[in-house]
Image: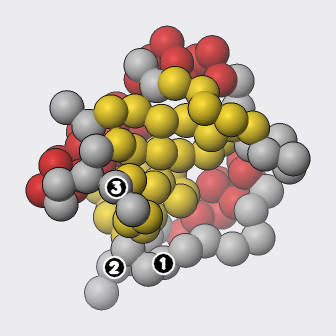
Amino acid sequence: MVIIPTEWLIDYIARTGVSRISFDKVVVLKDGFFTFSVRNDYLVILDGYGNGKRIEQVCMKIAKSRGLKKIRFFSRRNPKAFVRKFGVKVIGKTKEGFYLFEKEVV
């Protein structure tokens, strides 16, 4: 059983405004959590909270172990910060205002 600290969930929901979180595939770290799915050749991060660099490292390991080529995620936050910090590409924007990011698995 996976347990995510309640205070993390409350903070995540307050920051993002999401009304539901996917609990299909959940990874809980000592300093955050993320949920993901696999679509075609991509690992898609559905929800993420905490240490982004650590989440990136774990996602890379998961993607490599499954033979996936890219990682994708969405955010409403400033795309320049994600490009600078994580070396991702902005590949689109939804009508709801979410930026779509992508990174090659290395």
Dot placed on the residue nearer the N-terminal end, 1 or 2: 2
Where is residue 42 shown, x and y percent of the image? 38, 53
Q: Say what secondary structure mark 2 lies in.
A: loop
Residue placed most toward the observer, 29 or 71 = 71
Query: In this rendering, is residue 60 above or below 45?
Result: above
Asked if the residue at tag 3 contacts the one at tag 1, i.e. Cβ–Cβ closer than 8 Å, the answer is no
Asked if the residue at tag 2 contacts the one at tag 1, i.e. Cβ–Cβ closer than 8 Å, the answer is yes
Q: CA distance from mark 1 to mark 2?
A: 9 Å
Label 2: few (<14), some or many (≥20) within 10 Å? few
Residue placed most toward the observer, 71 or 31 = 71
Where is residue 12 shown, x and y percent of the image? 63, 55
**Residue 49 numbered mark, or none:** none
Dot placed on the residue nearer the N-terminal end, 1 or 3: 1
Q: In this figure, which residue is indicated by the disc labeled 3?
A: 41
Q: CA distance from mark 1 to mark 3?
A: 21 Å
Q: Say what secondary structure mark 1 lies in.
A: loop
Q: Quadrant of residue 3?
A: bottom left
Query: In this rendering, is residue 30 above or below 88?
Result: below
Q: In this figure, which residue is indicated by the disc labeled 2?
A: 2
